[in-house]
Amino acid sequence: MDSTTIDLCLNLFPGAKFRKKKGAIKLRTLLDLRGSIPTFIETTPALVHDIHILDILIVQPGAFYIMDRAYLDFKRLFQINQQGAYFVLRAKKNLQFKRLYSQKVDRNTGLRCDQTIRLAKENSCKNYLQKLRRVKFYDVTSRKYLVFLTNNFEIPALVITELYRYRWRIELFFKWIKQHLKVKSFFGTFEHAVKTQVWIAISTYILVAIIKMHLKLDYSLYTILQILSISLLEKVPIYQLLTETKQSPMTNEMPNQLNLFDF
């Protein structure tokens, strides 16, 4: 789960006030890492804080929700926990907690600690009533210490760090749609016009992703999009267009849609 900012002209979009002389909206997205396909999207003014999106998110039991520190709200995280789902997110530096016990870790893997903790701050304790797991990891590439919080106590600590590493895929998703789809300039200035154009762009991405997965293509999404864009008026089956092979002839099975004329 993450969000990206789309800049707008404040004179043309007065309802998208962001800063004093700047307008923007935020595209909040939940990306399914099993297929890099968004399963939840919400567009809001940029001034709306990220944590409010958790209030309208439909939680899937057993799923892992990977988020950054912007979504660290213990009351909302406890609701995710109560619904049978798991979360992995970065901890803030000023987190106050009490260590209950620690598990042994292999420091050669980058792990520094695997702790079971309880929140120490009064408000945090009231909002999150159960224990948490705190994992500290040293990233050799960035030369930084990363601290993660999760409510899952079963998977290995190193798996938690790897799960968070996959969060980078949503950044690639945002970068892709901004580069290849029309979400930087808008045809209309009303709220519904902006949302409609964003949804058209996302729908295009999803359709191309489904084609790539269904046909098991080695092409990148951008290449598929380019081939389709220059072939819109051609009467060629998509399978033949993208694979350069002729599609097998259709059988005489009963069609899903009834024929208009009985010939």
Image: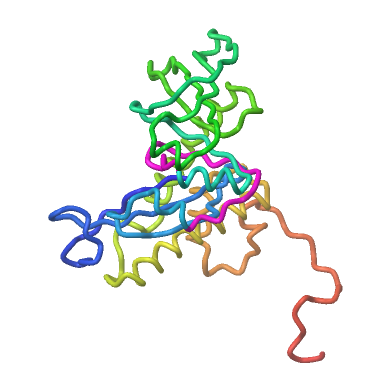
Figure check: 101 above or below 58: above
**Residue 18: within the magenta?**
no
Q: How is the image coloured?
A: rainbow
* In the depicted structure, whether residue 121 falls above or below residue 198: above
Q: Nearer the viewer, residue 251 or 12?
A: 12
Q: Looking at the image, which residue is at 67% across and 46% down?
A: 216
Q: Count the marks.
A: 0
**Residue 252, percent from left and from top:** 86, 73
Residue 210 picture quarter: bottom right
From which residue to which does the magenta span run?
A: 56-74
| Residue in the picture at 56% in, 34% down | 151
User: In which quarter of the view is residue 219 placed?
Assistant: top right
Quadrant that contains the C terminus:
bottom right
Residue depicted at x 46% and y 51%: 54
* Left or right side of 139 for 216: right
142 versus 193 height, above or below: above
